[in-house]
């Protein structure tokens, strides 16, 4: 955490990009080295099919819902996938806005699915752990535990480095984004700060975030990594109506977006802490189902965004797809193209 704080303080988004590039290469090499070695040590070969044949025969409950632990019902699995699909993480938006060009964003989005090339061998090791570590207390430690018991010390060291790299590349964009958002979006308009002061404040805010929020939560370990991620995605999904309003429905109003986010946030909090996932449906999905109608209704009963603001936005975002039609109204690009 101290290391992350230093390079975020010094270089911000540029440091995130450069360290992620190095960490990505390291994780790719280490993940496949560990995955193939573990597969060979567990099965005597490199045939993944043999592993799943044995798994189906001896522990088939791990291949079907609700899983061996009975904690992943069909409804929770399905709504978790939906929530994951429609979540908009703040760091992703920050990275889009800091790209040097549209071509950079396009190239980044094209290469993003290669992340799953890193995940595949780790999934294999996880299934191997079902046989090799039947009494494991925490499923999210399976790779490290298996490596320490069955793999050469060099691979264990590299896996530790790769795991650290993975945690750094996951946490650093969120820390940076939170510091930026509090400084730029909250404190600057509230306190009437200059851009220079806001920039310095964003740098210094990283340090108390590390010391007072992130470190205590990491030490306390409030839950498994998977469930922590799913909770976070439930809240991130509540931003989806804002994106609908920005890019697809210009009639949406600021009050409609805010009302929907607040309603969805409160429902997600209640169904995460007080009544956990009613009917086995992800709390974030419940929040989104409340968020969307509130967003639409409040937008329709409140004043729309002025036409000149909408036009100015789409002139920048889609300069070849927006025209003012004969009725004097500004229409979304698809409407204009049809006309």
Image (tube, rainbow, N blue to C red):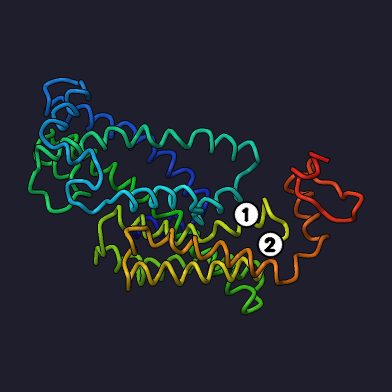
Residue 338, by quadrant, is: top right
Residue 74 falls left or right of residue 42: right
CA neighbours of label 2 inside 10 A, class few (<14), some (14 to 19), many (20+): many
Q: Residue furthest bottom?
A: 191
Residue 86 falls left or right of residue 324: left
Q: Nearer the viewer, residue 34 or 131?
A: 131
* Mark pair 2, 1: CA separation: 8 Å
Whether label 2 touches label 1, CB < 8 Å: yes
Q: Residue at x 39, y 52 (%)?
A: 79
Residue 307 falls left or right of residue 128: right
Residue 275, by quadrant, is: bottom left
Say whether residue 11 is visible. no
The quarter of the image holding the C terminus is: top right
Task: Tell me the element at label 2.
Answer: loop
Q: Residue furthest front?
A: 279
Q: Residue at x 28, y 45 (%)?
A: 163
**Is 77 situated above or below 214?**
above
Residue 329, by quadrant, is: bottom right
**Is 315 situated above or below 256?**
above
Say whether residue 336 is visible. yes
Residue 97: give x, y in percent of width and height. 61, 51
Residue 99: give x, y in percent of width and height. 60, 45
Q: Residue furthest right?
A: 326
The quarter of the image holding the N terminus is: bottom left
Marks 2 and 1, the one that precedes in the sequence? 1
Where does label 2 land, which residue?
A: 252
Q: Residue at x 31, y 66 (%)?
A: 276
Where does label 1 land, which residue?
A: 244
**Is 254 situated above or below 153?**
below
Residue 219: give x, y in percent of width and height. 25, 64
Task: Tell me the element at label 1.
Answer: helix
């Amino acid at each position: 955490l101290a290391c992350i704080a230093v390079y975020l303080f010094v270089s911000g988004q540029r440091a995130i990009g450069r360290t992620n590039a190095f960490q990505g290469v390291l994780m790719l090499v280490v993940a496949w080295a560990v995955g193939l070695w573990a597969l060979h040590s567990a099965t005597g070969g490199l045939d993944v099919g043999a592993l799943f044949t044995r798994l189906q025969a001896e522990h088939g409950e791990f291949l079907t819902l609700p899983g061996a632990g009975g904690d992943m019902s069909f409804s929770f699995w399905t709504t978790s996938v939906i929530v994951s699909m429609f979540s908009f993480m703040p760091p992703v938006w920050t990275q889009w806005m800091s790209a040097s060009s549209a071509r950079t964003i396009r190239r980044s989005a094209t290469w993003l699915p290669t992340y799953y090339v890193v995940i595949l061998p780790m999934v294999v090791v996880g299934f191997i752990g079902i046989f090799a570590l039947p009494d494991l207390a925490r499923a999210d430690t399976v790779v490290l535990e298996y490596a320490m018991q069955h793999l050469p010390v060099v691979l264990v060291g590299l896996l530790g480095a790769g795991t650290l790299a993975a945690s750094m590349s996951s946490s650093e964009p969120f820390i940076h984004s939170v510091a930026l958002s509090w400084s730029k979006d909250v404190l600057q308009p509230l306190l009437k700060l200059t851009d220079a002061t806001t920039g310095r404040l964003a740098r210094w805010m990283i340090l108390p975030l590390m010391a007072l929020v992130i470190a205590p939560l990491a030490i306390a370990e409030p839950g498994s990594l998977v469930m922590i991620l799913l909770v976070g995605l439930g809240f991130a999904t509540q931003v989806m109506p804002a994106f609908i309003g920005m890019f697809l429905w210009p009639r949406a109003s600021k009050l409609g977006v805010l009302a929907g986010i607040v309603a969805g946030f409160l429902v997600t909090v209640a169904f995460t802490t007080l009544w956990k996932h009613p009917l086995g449906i992800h709390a974030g999905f419940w929040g989104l189902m409340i968020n969307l109608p509130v967003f639409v209704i409040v937008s329709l009963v409140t004043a729309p965004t002025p036409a000149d603001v909408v036009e100015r936005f789409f002139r920048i975002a889609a300069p070849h797809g927006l025209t003012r039609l004969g009725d004097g109204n500004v229409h979304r690009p698809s409407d204009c193209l049809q006309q």
